[in-house]
């Protein structure tokens, strides 16, 4: 049921880490929203956000909802993955629309249970697979739908991180498959519009501190779809030349590519060669417009009951595929 909302939508942000900081900035920049509350177990971070925005701060969602539930209209969850389902359920029970960072959960069953609960309560949840809001990826997907390159043959997604994430984040990230590969798998499903029938993953670890936490830093994934389309995913935690995210789709009539973005489009050509800016440093720079577009979409959901672009069913299917990728990489077979 559509709610009567104030002139500015009052948003609560849970978690003030890397992605939480981006969402806080976008909420403050957006003329339709205000940071009404902030939640973090770190008292110093709460003090910083309160000074910047003047918002209410709390150490837990329970504390917020105990006395100030009527002071917020929507919640953005950026806390560690292990808290996502619990916090989302709590927000849904209080009738607060949710934008939750991915993965919602590493357990597909938990995602299905959350979806059932949210549907029964009539409260929308948008999952933060932000690449669907990127204007280059959106155009590529629309051109595929429009048939510009005919029937698909192959699709390749490359995601290489820069800088290597901090160790404290890696420990709670859910591993490279859930943290990184889930984005590529979501985009590939979105473009191909089918579910894979075959999955094969191979993984290695070259970085000692990642080996210490029993994770991989380099992964390739192969998928085959019912139509015969073949997909490959190439992921690495390290790209010293800059943040590297590209996608290529081959069809019967041609090819589509979404390339890396750079700080400027300047090209310098001299006797020494042809030079351009390096890739964007990392994801906050590469996706600065994309995260803002994602948040605008969330506002449309809150204000106008627009259907989420990324559903919990999408999250469930991505999680199932990731489980198969993990199993394949461990066993060394499809």
Image (cartoon, rainbow, N blue to C red):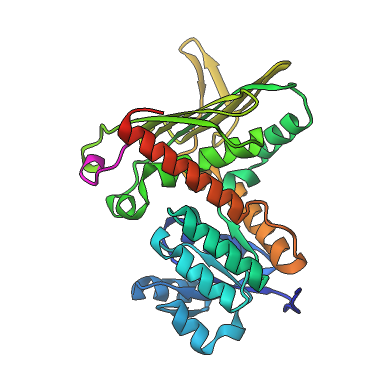
Q: Nearer the viewer, residue 112 or 100?
A: 112
Residue positioned 49% across, 53% down in the render: 102
Residue 316: x %, y % from top left: 54, 51
| Res. 231 image quadrant | top right
Q: Main secondary structure of the magenta part?
A: loop
| Res. 127 image quadrant | bottom right
Say which quadrant the N terminus sits in: bottom right
In the image, is residue 133 above or below residue 328?
Answer: below
Residues drawn in magenta: 210-216
**Residue 161 in view:** no
Residue positioned 37% across, 52% down in the render: 173
Residue positioned 65% across, 70% down in the render: 120
Q: Is residue 268 left or right of residue 73?
A: left
In the image, is residue 217 above or below residue 45?
Answer: above
Residue 254: x %, y % from top left: 70, 17
Residue positioned 32% across, 49% down in the render: 170
């Amino acid at each position: 049921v559509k709610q009567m909302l104030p002139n500015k939508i009052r948003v609560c942000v849970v978690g003030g880490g890397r992605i939480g900081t981006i969402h806080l900035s976008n909420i403050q920049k957006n003329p339709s929203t205000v940071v009404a509350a902030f939640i973090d177990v770190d008292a110093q971070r709460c003090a910083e956000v309160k000074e910047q925005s003047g918002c209410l701060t709390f150490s837990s969602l329970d504390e917020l909802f105990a006395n100030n539930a009527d002071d917020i209209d929507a919640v953005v969850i950026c806390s560690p993955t292990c808290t996502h389902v619990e916090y989302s359920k709590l927000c849904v029970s209080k009738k607060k629309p949710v934008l939750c960072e991915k993965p919602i959960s590493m357990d597909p069953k938990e995602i299905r249970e959350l979806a059932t609960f949210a549907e029964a309560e009539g409260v929308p949840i948008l999952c933060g697979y932000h690449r669907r809001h990127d204007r280059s990826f959106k155009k590529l997907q629309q051109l595929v739908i429009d048939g510009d390159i005919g029937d698909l043959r192959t699709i390749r997604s490359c995601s290489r991180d820069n800088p290597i994430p901090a160790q404290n984040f890696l420990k709670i990230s859910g591993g490279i498959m859930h943290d990184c590969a889930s984005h590529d798998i979501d985009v590939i499903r979105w473009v191909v519009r089918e579910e894979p029938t075959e999955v094969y993953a191979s993984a290695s670890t070259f970085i000692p501190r990642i080996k210490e936490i029993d994770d991989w830093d380099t992964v390739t994934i192969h998928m085959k779809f019912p139509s015969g389309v073949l997909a490959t995913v190439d992921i690495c935690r390290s790209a010293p030349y800059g943040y590297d995210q590209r996608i290529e789709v081959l069809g019967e009539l041609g090819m589509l590519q979404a390339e890396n973005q750079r700080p400027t489009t300047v090209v310098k050509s001299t006797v020494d060669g042809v030079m351009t800016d390096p890739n964007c440093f990392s994801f906050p720079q590469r996706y600065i417009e994309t995260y803002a577009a994602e948040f605008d979409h969330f506002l449309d959901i809150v204000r106008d009951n627009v259907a989420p672009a990324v559903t919990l069913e999408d999250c469930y299917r991505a999680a199932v595929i990731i489980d198969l990728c993990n199993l394949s990489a461990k066993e060394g077979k499809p």
